[in-house]
Image (spheres, helix red, strand yellow):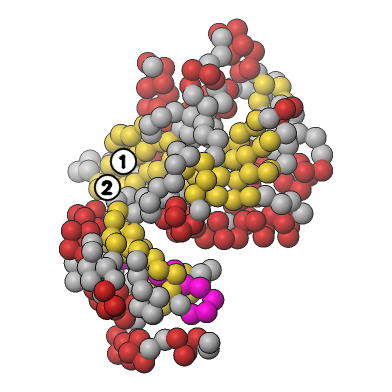
Amino acid sequence: HHLNDLIPPSFEDWLESTSITLTQVNGQRKYGGPPTGWRGPAPGPGCEVFISSIPRDVFEDCLIPLFQTVAPLYEFRLMMNFSGQNRGFAYAKYGRPADAEAAIRALHLHPLRGGMCLIVKMSTEKRQLCLGELPAGVSEEALLTVLRMVSDGVRGVTVRVAGPRGKATSALVFYSSHYAASMAKKVLVQAFKKQYGVSISVRWFSGSSKPRHDESEEEGALACPGPKPVGQALLTAASFQLARSAFRDPHPQLFSRVVGGPAPQASSGEAVPHDAVGRLRRLCELYGLGLPIYDVRYHHTSADGFLCVSYSVLVPGLPMPFCGVAQVLPGPSTNTTEEEARRTAAEQVLKAMSRA
């Protein structure tokens, strides 16, 4: 069928009358993110709902107005196939967690034509992908560099080696949002094959081998080796002193060179970094905890001119992120202010880890 044959006239009339803009990218059609006229910050965690059991001939002209009856929508994404039908599920994101909860209460089991009822539940907002079948010897730095070249929103990566002689290499990749992770999931296999001649596998990360009854059913979640337990990664005092002088090359090699050449070697003789961010990074490397992932958010400016920020620092090998609030002096640019906030957060994490 031609695409226009599958879209009812009411849909086209609705688009014309509302002046709503829909963008189709990699199998999903998106409204907003943010929509025109949106005021306020981008929504945080807990603001998105997952919608399933959508009839294949139901489109945004029915769904967006329905979910807007609860509260203004920041974003709405309907999953589509190439024939022009929807794939039966969608995501609606609101400005506040309370609005998402209200949508679940109001619209879960909402009846549509044909006797079907919508299933509405909180989205898990998965942000982690598991990459498998990576070349042996690839470093976290090299992989991180490549991932940032072929996908957006990469926050960090943890490489895991298993199997005889460390030949089975996988990685856990952290993205800034579920949308960024889902877009990366669609392009990584082809990008690695085309640019580096490497065939990898890409799956959603699931902390359990048991599938969840949400996006996982549609997108195929698969368990991936998780971070090492802290107890298995501890070093003795003597080995810690020895390892402090063994630094990795700070300039990551290109991925294509890693594939064809030896694994990057640690260099020696470098000074331990004095900067808190560098010390925390090195400490996490030594203990095999993965690279720290920072999320710093501005809240307000105090009366004495300090910027009040909240921070969350995720160390992949530890069970919970470090969260707190801090005050920092504004710098000459946004980048320097954010760097100062990260240093402050890293100092607090180092203090907390030293007390553990």
Q: Residue at x 31, y 40 (%)?
A: 310
Look at mark 1 in the image and give the residue it sits on: 310
Occupied quadrant, residue 217: bottom left
Query: Disc 2 designates what residue?
Result: 299
Relative horizontal placement of residue 185, taking residue 92 as reference (left or right) = right
Q: Position of residue 221 (x, y in %)?
A: 49, 49
- Residue, far top: 238
Mark 1–mark 2 distance (CA, rounded to whole Å):
7 Å
Label 2 sits on what residue type? His
User: Which residue range is magenta in the image?
Assistant: 73-84
Q: Residue at x 76, y 41 (%)?
A: 258
What is the x, y in percent for residue 123?
34, 54
Q: Is residue 83 magenta?
A: yes
Q: Quadrant of residue 32?
A: bottom left
* Residue 28 placement (x, y as % from top left): 46, 69
Residue 356 coordinates in the image, percent (x, y): 38, 17
